[in-house]
Image: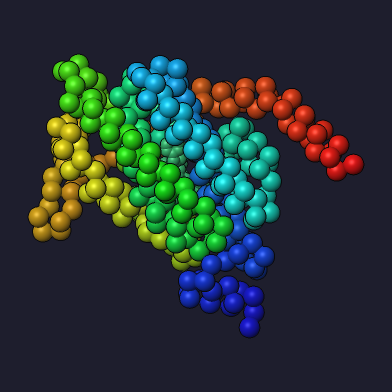
Amino acid sequence: MTEQHRFDERIAQEIAIEPQDWMPDEYRKTLIRQIGQHAHSEIVGMLPEGNWLTRAPSLKRKAILLAKVQDEAGHGLYLYSAAETLGCTREDIYQKMLDGKMKYSSIFNYPTLNWADIGVIGWLVDGAAIVNQVALCRTSYGPYARAMVKICKEESFHQRQGFEACNVLAQGSEEQRQMLQDAINRFWWPALMMFGPNDDNSPNSAQSLAWKIKRFGNDELRQRFVDNTVPQVEMLGMTVPDKDLRFNDTTGHYEFGEIDWQEFNEVVAGRGLCNEERLAAKRKAWEEGAWVREAALSYASKNVA
Ligand code: FAQ
């Protein structure tokens, strides 16, 4: 039996591929790309919410937000570790992100303008992330699948705290309700974009599905998110900014309008509202943290001797 054959059999039988196993070069490359981008998203994703840590409306909200942002850092670290089991170094892929040669999720290139944005990020952005990541708990690469299990538990807390914060605003003053509706209006479409292009425009989907790296197509997961979330928007007494949204009694699913793919492509190409600001912040942190890396290396080398 050839190595390729053994690999194909493991995939067919749903036996996880582990770091020491033989795998096709393209499978390895695809995983480094996806896990690396996922790690970068977690790390860059700390910035929009970090922006509100010093302005949270109460000590309770501040403590929750601080815990959430720290969780995102932890997710980034698991994911960089999972990527490293494939033979890349985190310095290399991190540098590629800083140089704009590796992507991170489009969603983090939108600004957080008011406190409601923080609730809406937890509710909608982490909500979308969970739909995508629950599916990845069964991805074919063992270290990625295992990282996803812990990450999903934490994302679930993030989603619930976001919904709870939105619920408080929804029951507040007219001004608070307007603030919430405004945040939903700005984040709804970008949240739908998190699932990536439509399946017929998704160059990586067919192969990733065949390798069981992805377990569902982009459109199926996006539909699941819309079906889960529209009733929650209604529960808050808010509206979805989509005039084409309607429930189809026959299919049991919501039909929704066309995503602005031009906007998606612009943001992914680096021309969104905050792309430059986000990368500048990460470059600054990397440069200013050089002394910490040097000190840690020096300490480690003394301990070895
Ligand atoms: N943004 O052929 P496909 C979080 C790129 S959750 C930017 O469909 P694929 C939690 C794609 O990379 C967010 N780029 O690609 C959190 C590809 O480009 P490439 C992170 C996008 O990989 C919450 C090209 O378009 N989650 O961080 C986007 O099969 C709150 C063609 O697309 C993950 O990364 C996009 N939205 O499917 C943190 C989940 N969509 O690489 C802080 C894991 C597509 O060929 C605060 N990733 N592209 O040059 C995945 O499931 C997949 O990679 C998809 C894309 C579904 C994102």
Which residue is more in the foreground, 62 or 75? 62
State the residue at coordinates (65%, 68%): 22
The extreme right residue here reads 305
Residue 1, horizontal then vertical, whole percent: 63, 83
The extreme front residue here reads 60
Query: Residue 39 is drawn in which quadrant?
Result: top right
Query: Residue 180 is drawn in which quadrant?
Result: top left
Residue 178, horizontal then vertical, whole percent: 20, 21
Q: How is the image coloured?
A: rainbow
Above or below for 200 versus 42: below
User: Is residue 38 among what the camera can see?
Assistant: yes
Q: How many marks?
A: 0
State the residue at coordinates (62%, 32%): 99
Q: Which quarter of the rendered image does ligand 1 occupy? A: top left
Which residue is more in the foreground, 164 or 25? 164
State the residue at coordinates (37%, 59%): 216
The extreme left residue here reads 249
State the residue at coordinates (69%, 46%): 89
Residue 172, horizontal then vertical, whole percent: 19, 21
Q: Quadrant of the C terminus?
A: top right
Above or below for 49 versus 210: above
Residue 303, horizontal then vertical, whole percent: 84, 40
Left or right of 162 in this view: 286: right
User: Is residue 267 among what the camera can see?
Assistant: no
Which residue is more in the foreground, 66 or 145? 66
Left or right of 52 in this view: 82: right
